[in-house]
Amino acid sequence: MKNRGAFICIEGLDGCGKSTQAKLLVKRLKKNHNAVYTAEPSRGKIGTYIRENYLYGEKRFSVVLEALLFAADRIEHLESEIFPFLDKGFLVISDRYVYSSLAYQGAAGLSIEWIEKINDHAIQPDLAVFIDVNPETVMSRLKPKKSVMENLETQKKVREIYLKFVEDGRLIRIDGDKSEKEVAKEVYEVVTKFLNTFY
């Protein structure tokens, strides 16, 4: 086994079940590996600010400010959690990563190239999985108190960008409309196949 761990991110629309699937994956991986769950927005100062003062506010910030905040949180996340765990040989499973910024702020009208530029110091994940669920389905799952990004029009645009990354080979698509158990099985199979080639 390599000294460095592996970095895997789970992406998807709000309400697609990615948080549940990321946690189920970590639980299963722990049987044979050192694995840890983490998420964005992170538990750091910037991520906490985003969650407490922005996500459930009455309106979105300017999309430029939004993108910069998430990019800053990502660097703090990498430096405080992801890098230290990777250095210890852990499998780090992140519930959202840079693709969320590309999809959500891209859907809001920002240039994908500019978003990539401000995230230039964020490492590429070793594996990125997209749990694909119909936007109408995720809207029916969301809580009454929705975030500023949880509306049908936004979710449709976000999904289109995610699917372009699937076409480009940057994300591996998994059908999230199946049962939780079936999705978990498929996620684990994709990750196991990756790990067999990685180590």
Image (tube, grey):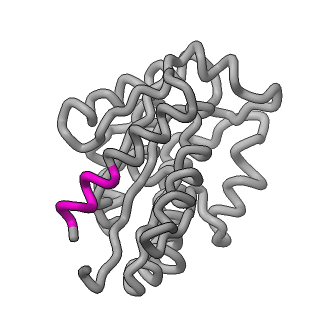
Classify 152 as above or below 38: above
State the image coordinates of residue 69 (x, y, percent, origin top left).
55, 57
Residue 171 falls in image quadrant = top left
Give how far across and how far down residue 156 sits, in percent: 48, 19
User: From this viewpoint, which residue is outermost toward the front?
Assistant: 31
Query: Viewed as shown, does residue 85 lie left or right of 62?
Result: left
| Residue 1: image location, x then y, percent | 25, 80
| Pick the front one: 111 or 45 | 45
Residue positioned 50% across, 21% down in the render? 177
Question: What is the magenta range?
Answer: 191-198
Q: Nearer the viewer, residue 183 or 115?
A: 183
Give the residue at x 76% y 41%. Answer: 56
Residue 175 in the magenta stretch? The answer is no
Task: Say if 96 sits above or below 35 in the image.
Answer: above
In this view, 107 is above or below 101: above
Identified at 62% across, 32% down, the residue is 15
Left/right of residue 61 with respect to residue 186 in the rendered view: right
